[in-house]
Image (tube, rainbow, N blue to C red):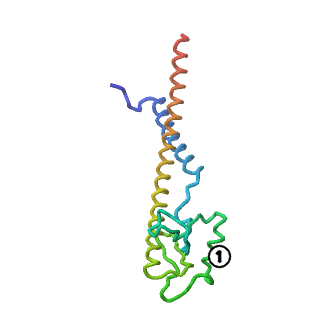
Amino acid sequence: MPNFRLDSRSKRSFFVLILVLSILGATYTTYTQRIIDPEEWYFYTVKSEAIDIRSPTRQVIIEFGFRRSISYKIYEKRCSMKNVVTRDDAPSGAQHRGVWLCNPAGFSGQEFNIRHGYFKEQVDDLYVQYYSRVVERTLWGLMSGLGLWAALLALFVTFRWIRSGQH
């Protein structure tokens, strides 16, 4: 049965090395590749005849994009307070999980409810993608750290094996 006690200096050093490399690997992969937070996306309603097979009406009913993209200026123009249709029966928009749906097309009642439901599905999908990428990158970083540790351990064992033959 192998001895896994940390009773020698080299065993403690390798244990600390495992922890340090795992943390460094996870930190590196988490912070070097940007994951877009769902709250950085924007959505707005549109009247369009274009086809969207995922939409409940099979037409494009909402547009969305990332706030740091070029098309964000279109969103700002359409959703400025002077351009949003303000009728008593038409909401100016809706919010779901910190993301805003602007209603510049002025839909109300059932028409708005269809768009709002589709918007909520899209936001939920963005959150699923966001959390899965966070977990993926964290696990990738941990595995990278462990792989680096295994490579260093192999080098150390090889070095000791070579040195043991030089008596």
In the depicted structure, whether residue 18 falls above or below residue 90: above
Image coordinates of residue 54 in percent, x first then y, are: 47, 63
106 or 20, nearer to the observer: 106
Residue furthest top in the image: 167
Query: Could you tell me which quadrant the C terminus lies in?
Result: top right
Q: Residues within 10 Å of mark 1 (few under 14, many from 20)?
A: few
Q: Is residue 124 left or right of residue 33?
A: left
Image coordinates of residue 62 in percent, x first then y, are: 53, 70
Q: Can you tell which quarter of the image residue 67 is in?
A: bottom right
Residue furthest left in the image: 1
Q: Can you tell which quarter of the image residue 56 is in?
A: bottom left
In the depicted structure, whether residue 25 falls above or below residue 69: above
In the depicted structure, whether residue 112 falls above or below residue 140: below
Query: Could you tell me which quadrant the N terminus lies in?
Result: top left
55 or 23, nearer to the observer: 55
Residue drawn at x 52%, y 46% is 26
Q: Secondary structure at mark 1?
A: helix
Residue drawn at x 51%, y 26% is 154
Q: Is residue 119 left or right of residue 76?
A: left
Residue drawn at x 41%, y 30% is 7
Q: Amino acid at mark 1?
A: Lys
In the depicted structure, whether residue 49 falls above or below residue 108: above
Q: Which residue matches tag 1?
A: 77
Image coordinates of residue 38 in percent, x first then y, are: 52, 63
What count of labels does the image hold? 1
